[in-house]
Amino acid sequence: MEHREVQAARHSPLVAVVLIAALAVTLAGIFPFRQILAQNRQVETTEAKLAALQTENAALEDQIRALNTDVELERLAREELGMVEPGEIGFTAYSEPGSELPAVPDAAANFDDRSFAQKIWDFLTGRDLDANG
């Protein structure tokens, strides 16, 4: 019996070192892995933003082409500048200063309703590193 106890006592520091080394290797793999996942999501988000900007650019180019027509210029002059043709009567409506309603801050915007398990998963996959979630 004593021989087994001595052998077990000799192996317990070795087992502890092996477990610590395994934990270190695991953690060394998790942190770069989550950064890679976060960077991949960031690339996807940036590509989506690029596509949206390209669509917006096309719409703005259409607006520029429309602004070069007399009909659109007259419409804008009437709406934005109050232009009236001779013989027409123009009306302007004003609101009283201070009559606008104050903006109410959205308290729910800062509330994180993810579960604990979801927060852990987001940490492991690197979603917490991505500002867009």
Image (cartoon, grey):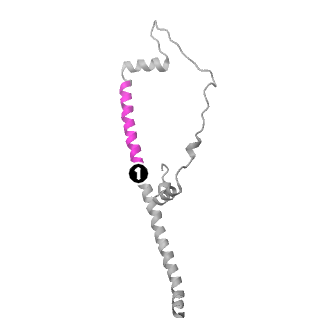
Residue 61 occupies which quadrant of the picture?
top left
Q: Residue at x 43, y 51 (%)?
A: 42
Q: Position of residue 3 (x, y in %)?
A: 52, 93
Q: Position of residue 64 (x, y in %)?
A: 38, 28
Relative depth, front residue between 45 and 128: 128
Per the picture, the main secondary structure of the magenta-coloured stretch is helix
Q: Residue at x 42, y 19 (%)?
A: 75
Q: Position of residue 90 (x, y in %)?
A: 50, 11
In terms of secondary structure, where does tag 1 sit? helix
Relative depth, front residue between 116 and 66: 116
Disc 1: which residue: 43
Q: Residue at x 61, y 29 (%)?
A: 101
Q: Is residue 57 magenta?
A: yes
Question: Taking 17 as reference, is 74 above or below it?
Answer: above
Q: Is residue 68 left or right of residue 1?
A: left
Give the magenta-colored segment's residue range. 45-66
- How many numbered marks have been drawn onto this rendered protein structure? 1
- Amino acid under disc 1: Val
Q: Is residue 45 left or right of residue 103?
A: left
Q: Is residue 109 magenta?
A: no
Q: Residue at the right extreme?
A: 98
Question: Taking 26 as reference, is 77 above or below it?
Answer: above
Q: Residue at x 63, y 23 (%)?
A: 97
Q: Is residue 72 left or right of residue 113?
A: left
Question: Taking 104 as reference, is 124 above or below it?
Answer: below
Residue 96 occupies which quadrant of the picture?
top right
Q: Position of residue 87 (x, y in %)?
A: 46, 6
